[in-house]
């Protein structure tokens, strides 16, 4: 169905009869004005008669235009190109402007919407890469953020993002649920540790315990201050001061809360 095609017609017999009457009145007003205008050009009659005839013609034409617009509004047309998915009224039903009458679906420009917490406002940017998955269908695709909202919803403290769906995704349907993973940070070289190994002292400093080997089965625990930049799937980006960590060190995991700086730890193979 094309945009503008008729979907449903509402009974408009009364308006149609009013239009016939208004057309007759408008034609009479135009004829009267034309005659009065000819007389006025010949300096016959008063200016007031000419202005009254002109006013009556304009009022009649405006009334006719209003009735035709009212008649147009009794026809429900397709707002855009698409497919009629459902007709929600039947012949003889009462309807109103606030009552849905039909559902027209257009899948040619599908987009996904999501609400993102305001804490990500500085890190989520337009054109950021995203991974979209549909758990109920087992389908995925890669895309980009097409739009990042400029308004924070006060009811849930989130802002809206939009992802455009590439052409060819025939399984897309309105209200289909998806999971959207947005890249909010990129670091080509970073130290990654399990999030559970990052502890915090009474001063609010984040730290981990690194094992410096002294023998094959023993090591000393060394406290290293880190900064938790980001966390994803149980792993944290935790850079330390240069020289403290180089990568590949063994980090205390189980029982880390019972370890102190310089404590000797027995390493179990």
Image (spheres, rainbow, N blue to C red):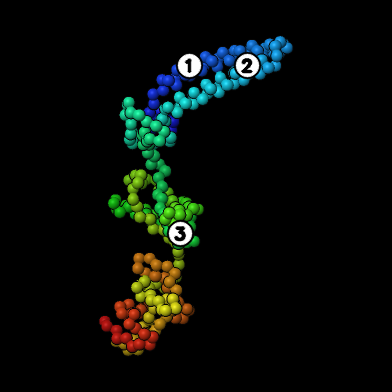
The residue drawn where x is 26% and y is 82% is 269
Mark 2 or mark 1: which comes first in sequence? 1
The residue drawn where x is 33% and y is 36% is 85
Q: Between residues 231 and 170, which one lies in front from this camera angle?
A: 231
Image coordinates of residue 90 in percent, x first then y, are 31, 29
The residue drawn where x is 34% and y is 73% is 196
Image coordinates of residue 19 in percent, x first then y, are 48, 19
**Dot 1: within a 10 Å radius of its alpha carbon, few (fewer than 14), some, or many (20 or more) residues?**
few
On the image, numbered disc 2 is attached to which residue?
53
Q: Are marks 2 and 1 in contact (CB under 8 Å)?
A: no
On the image, numbered disc 1 is attached to which residue?
20
Left or right of residue 29: residue 74? left
In which image quadrant can residue 40 be found? top right
The numbered disc on residue 97 is: none
The residue drawn where x is 51% and y is 16% is 23
**Dot 3: within a 10 Å radius of its alpha carbon, few (fewer than 14), some, or many (20 or more) residues?**
some
In which image quadrant can residue 260 be found? bottom left
**Dot 2: within a 10 Å radius of its alpha carbon, few (fewer than 14), some, or many (20 or more) residues?**
many
Mark 2 or mark 3: which comes first in sequence? 2
For the N terminus, which image quadrant?
top left
On the image, numbered disc 3 is attached to which residue?
118
């Amino acid at each position: 169905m094309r945009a503008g095609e008729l979907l449903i017609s509402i009974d408009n017999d009364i308006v149609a009869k009013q239009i016939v009457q208004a057309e007759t009145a408008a034609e009479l007003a135009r004829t009267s004005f034309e005659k009065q205008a000819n007389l006025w050009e010949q300096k016959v009659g008063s200016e007031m008669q000419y202005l009254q005839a002109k006013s009556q013609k304009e009022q009649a034409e405006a009334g006719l235009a209003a009735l035709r617009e009212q008649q147009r509004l009794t026809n429900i047309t397709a707002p855009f190109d698409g497919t009629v998915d459902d007709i929600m009224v039947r012949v003889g039903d009462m309807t109103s402007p606030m009552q849905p009458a039909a559902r027209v679906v257009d899948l040619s420009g599908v987009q996904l919407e999501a609400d993102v917490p305001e804490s990500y406002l500085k890190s989520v940017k337009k054109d950021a890469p995203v991974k979209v998955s549909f758990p109920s269908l087992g389908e995925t695709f890669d895309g980009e953020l097409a739009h990042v909202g400029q308004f924070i919803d006060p009811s849930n403290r989130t802002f809206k993002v939009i992802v455009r769906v590439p052409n060819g995704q025939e399984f897309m349907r309105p209200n289909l649920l998806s999971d959207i993973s947005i890249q909010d940070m990129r670091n080509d070289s970073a130290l990654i540790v399990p999030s559970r190994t990052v502890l915090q002292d009474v001063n609010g400093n984040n730290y981990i315990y690194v094992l410096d080997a002294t023998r094959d089965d023993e090591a000393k625990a060394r406290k290293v201050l880190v900064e938790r930049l980001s966390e994803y799937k149980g792993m944290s980006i935790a850079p330390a001061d240069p020289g403290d960590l180089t990568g590949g060190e063994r980090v205390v995991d189980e029982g880390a809360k019972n370890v102190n700086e310089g404590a000797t730890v027995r390493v179990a193979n």
